[in-house]
Image: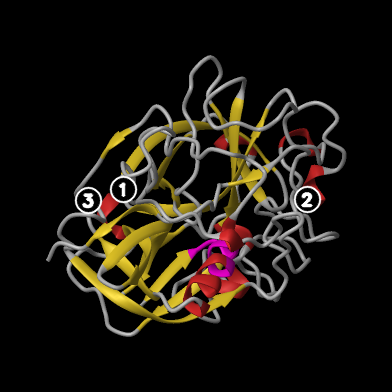
Amino acid sequence: MLLISPFLSMAHATMPPPIVGGSEVSGHPYKQVGAFVAEKGGFAGSFCSGTLVAARRVITAAHCVEAAEDYEGAGYTLYFVVADEVGGSWEDAAVIKSMHSHPSYSATTAQHDIAVLYLESGIQDFGTMALNTEYLVQADVGESLTYVGYGLTDSDKANSGGTRRKVNVPIYYYDNSFVYTYADGASKNVCSGDSGGAAIWKDAETGNWELVGVNTFVFDMDEVAPDCDSGKPAAAAVRIDRELDFLEEHVEFEREGDSDTDADSDSDTDTDSDADSDSGVPQETGVDTGPEDTGEAPGADCGGCSQGSPSGWWALGLLGLFGLRRRRS
C-alpha cells in the first residue's frame, strides 16, 4: 500500500510518472546516483534521489531535506541506497547521519535548492561523481544533459516506483541559478521522485562524467499548468558551478583555475589587470545571465526568472513514498 503523507501533500491529486521518455539504467556512472529512502517497520520507499560525490557525502535538493525531516520526525529511518530497484536487493546503503541545506535556500523561488547529506558509513564500491566547476557558457546551449533519478513508471501504478532511470535532454537555456532543459517535439523530462537527482554530462576533454545540476522543478514552456509529460514540458536543475562556495564547506574538490598561471600580479588566470578570470562571470556583478544576457528563462512572460523560478513552476512532486514495500535482503 502506498502511503500518502499529509505533510507532503500538494494540490495535484495524482502522482505523475518519473523520468519521462527514458529507460532503466545500471552500471557506471549511474550507480553513483542513489535513492533517498525512508524505512519503518520493515517497509521502505524512496521519495527523492541523490548523487554520491564522496564515500560519505551525497548531493541532493534542499526541498528533499524538508521532506526527509518530516519523515524523520514521524519515526522513519533515512537511508541513501544504491540499488537498481529500491524494492529489491540493496547493493549498498548507509544511514543518513545529518543533512545540510544551503543557508539561502528559498522554498518559494527554489533558489539554492541544494543540500549535502552526511552518511554514517562509507559507500566505496561504485565510485563517486565529479563536479562541474567550469561556468556554463553560450556554447553549452544545445549540449545534452543526462538526467538520472527514481520514481513511478505510471501515475496509475502506485507501487511501480523506486527504479533508477535516465533520459537525455538538451540544454535550452541557463540563468544565474538554473540550467534549463527542453526537448522540442519530444516528451522527455524529469518528474516526481527525480528531485535531488543528477543532471550529468561527459566532459569532452577528460572523458569523466560530471554533475552539472541537481534536479529541482518542472514547468511548461507555454506557461500553462506545469506537467512532466504533456504540453511543452521542461525542467530546471540548480547549477553546480554556481554553488561551489557552499559545496566546498562539505565536499573536497578542485576548482578550475585554482592556481595562477598568467604573468600578471593578480590571482586570476587571464592576462588583464582585474581580479576575474573572464570565464563567463562579469567582474562587475559576479553573475552570468545566460544566452544574450536577457535574464529571462524560457516561456512567455517569465518576469525576471534569473532571480527566481519561472511562473507556473512545480517542484518535483513530493507526494509520498514511491514503491513502498517490505524490504528484501
x, y percent for residue 154: 39, 32
What secondary structure predominates along the stretch shown in magenta? Answer: helix
Residue at the spot x=53%, y=38% of the render?
Answer: 14
- Which circle, 2 or 3, is nearer the viewer? 3
Task: Give the farthest residue toward the front.
Answer: 1
Residue underneath mark 2: 308
Determine the secondary structure under disc 1. loop
Q: State the CA–CA distance, disc 1 to disc 3.
A: 24 Å
In primary-sequence order, the first of circles 1 and 3 is 3
x, y percent for residue 226: 66, 33
Residue underneath mark 3: 84
105 and 35: which is toward the camera? 35
Under mark 3, the amino acid is Asp
157 and 172: which is toward the camera? 157
The question of residue 42 being in magenta is answered with no
Its colouring scheme is secondary structure
Q: Residue 271 falls in which quadrant of the image? A: bottom right
- Which circle, 1 or 3, is nearer the viewer? 3
Task: Give the farthest residue toward the left.
Answer: 329
Task: Give the farthest residue toward the top.
Answer: 185
Determine the secondary structure under disc 3. loop
Q: Residue 153 falls in which quadrant of the image? A: top left
